[in-house]
Image (cartoon, rainbow, N blue to C red):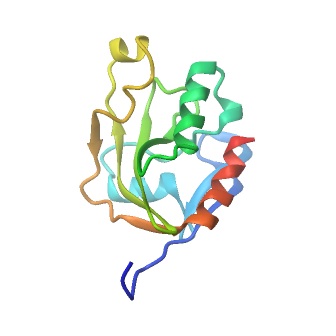
Amino acid sequence: MGAGLEINKMEVIKMKSKYCDNEHYCIVVDGNPLDSLLQSINSEEDYEGLIPTILDWIDEPREKSLVLSRYRSPEQIVMLPILMCPDDCDLWCTLVVVEVVKEGSFIKWNRIGLDRSTREELINGYECIGTRVDWFADFQSMTFKQDEYYAQLKKLLH
């Protein structure tokens, strides 16, 4: 990583979101909630109010297992389901995935976009998630310190 690398700050903090009356964990990058950030770069769609893939909120064991395995994956590049619709709290509705790249002691969010897995693919299992994605053209990649990144994301797993 060269000099002058801009490091983003990620926090997972409890707050209210657009459609949830109760406080819950939200991903905040450089002081901006991730759903609002995506809304600002993609205003023709509705991303405001999407919530993190909080394990406690996902009921289906296979969905929970996929999300957990992607969070904890040792792979260098992982397609991580990061935001979901708060109505059903599953991987079938609106699902935002991020391409996570491990680079030394840093984690880079290379691209972020909308998962386009079909119903037929999802019926056969969840490994298809992240294979067909509409990447957001205006997303600027983000880089996080690995230890801070994992310490924050751990809050979503309990």
* Front residue of this view, candidates 157 and 134: 157
Identify whether 145 is placed above or below 25.
below
The answer to whether any part of residue 6 appears in the image is yes
The answer to whether any part of residue 89 appears in the image is no
Residue 18 in percent (x, y) is at 59, 46
Number of marks drawn:
0
Q: Quadrant of residue 96?
A: top left
Identify whether 6 is placed above or below 66.
below
Identify whether 112 is placed above or below 61.
below
Horizontal side of residue 105 vs 116, given as left or right:
right
* Front residue of this view, candidates 85 and 98: 98
Q: Quadrant of residue 90?
A: top right
Q: Residue at x 56, y 71 (%)?
A: 9
Identify whether 139 is placed above or below 51.
below
Horizontal side of residue 76 vs 116, given as left or right:
right
Horizontal side of residue 92 vs 31, given as left or right:
left
Of all residues, the one furthest to the bottom in this rendering is: 3
Quarter containing the C terminus:
top right
Residue 26 in percent (x, y) is at 63, 52
Q: Residue at x 27, y 41 (%)?
A: 134
Q: Residue at x 51, y 47 (%)?
A: 74
Horizontal side of residue 77 vs 132, given as left or right:
right
Q: Quadrant of residue 1?
A: bottom left
Q: Residue at x 58, y 44 (%)?
A: 72
Residue 152 in percent (x, y) is at 66, 58
